Amino acid sequence: MENTASRAEGGAIEKSGAPRCGASRKGGLSRHNQFERKRTFTGLVMLIPTTVFCTLFIIVPVIRVFYLSFMNWNGISTEKTFAGFSNYARLPSTEGFWEMAKGTIIYALGVTVFTIIISFILAMALDQKGRGRLNRSVMRSLWFFPCLLGLAIVGILWHIMYNYSNGLINSIIKMFGGKPVNWLETYGVTRWAIIIASVWSQIGLCIIVFLAGLQSIPTDLYEAAAIDGASPRQRRWKITVPMMAPAITINVLTTNITAFKMYELPWIVSNGMPGYSTRLLTQRIFFYAFQGMDYGIGSALSVVLIIIITIISLVQLVFLRKREDVY
């Protein structure tokens, strides 16, 4: 009888304890769900300003550009006439179009290649530690300083340095007994002049991204490779370069897009001379729309440039992401 009573009491205790445990779990889950809902709501609220600004200043203007590319409009009149694809058909026959298109592609390619290579080498140098080296923080700040300047200011500085008579670069050349170079009015030379100025203005941001990538590489990989007998050159080529693939992807895409959209710096440095060799498509868009008062063909050229940037960026993204997957 006593055993039966004790079993009955134990069963009652177990039965009475089960709901309490379930209730605590349900309470924990409900609190967790409330926290998740609050966090989701807070995230959505924080996204509202960015969404509004992107819609007003990116999405809406792009849609309007596509719309105006099929219209004839002078930018002032309230009347617009439908032109179909005639604005696009006019582009190849406009004066200097193919030379400007070629110059834009060469300029963007040159800026991207040299910016990535130089910034990668400088980032590796700035990441090194050792005695007798200059303060790394100071050197990083100096390399980043050009990014703080406006592109118009950078253009003015390089235009002054490229001056044929008393520019800094020709003065240095004459100091060593060389002949001055007409940097701003010579075919081929002027194009390299604006590429150098553009690389100097963008190199700081790429260095920052590469430094972040270098500092994220585990030191254990280098120690293990050194124990296995790998030379410093082999460690850089087999470890550093593959592990930097994500940083390379970011820098290539951002630098390439920036180069294709560049306007003020090349124009201030060379004023588009000589001929159309250093005039970019962005400068021609400004000429058509705001000087020639032909918003239709200006918008059509903008759409063409958007398509070119999109295609090139997608190709680069696919190729570079494959390298990330490999490594």
Image (tube, grey):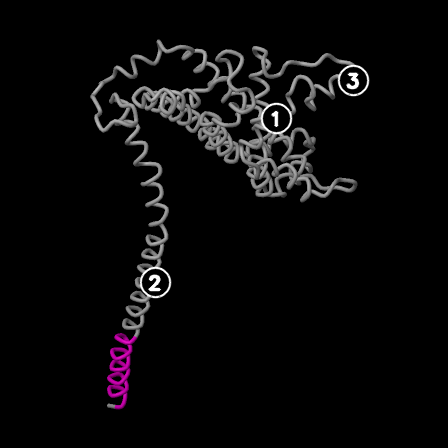
Which residue appears at 57% of the width and 41% of the height? 212
Q: Where's the N terminus, which quadrant?
A: bottom left
Mark found first going from the N terminus, 3 or 2: 2
Kindly report the distance in space between the C-alpha atoms of the residues bearing marks 2 and 1.
55 Å
49 or 325: nearer the eye?
49
- Residue wearing tag 3: 176
Q: Which residue is mark 1?
A: 158
Which segment is the magenta one?
Answer: 2-20
Q: Are marks 3 and 2 in contact (CB under 8 Å)?
A: no
Question: Percent x, y for residue 295?
Answer: 31, 23
Q: Is residue 13 above or below residue 253?
A: below
**Residue 10, horizontal then vertical, whole percent:** 28, 82
- Quarter-of-image position of residue 98: top left
First-in-chain label (1 vs 3):
1
Q: Is residue 292 magenta?
A: no
- Based on the displayed image, in which of its 4 quarters is residue 225 positioned? top right
Image position, residue 166 (x, y; %): 70, 21
> What's the amino acid at mark 2?
Phe
- For this view, does 318 lie left or right of residue 86? right
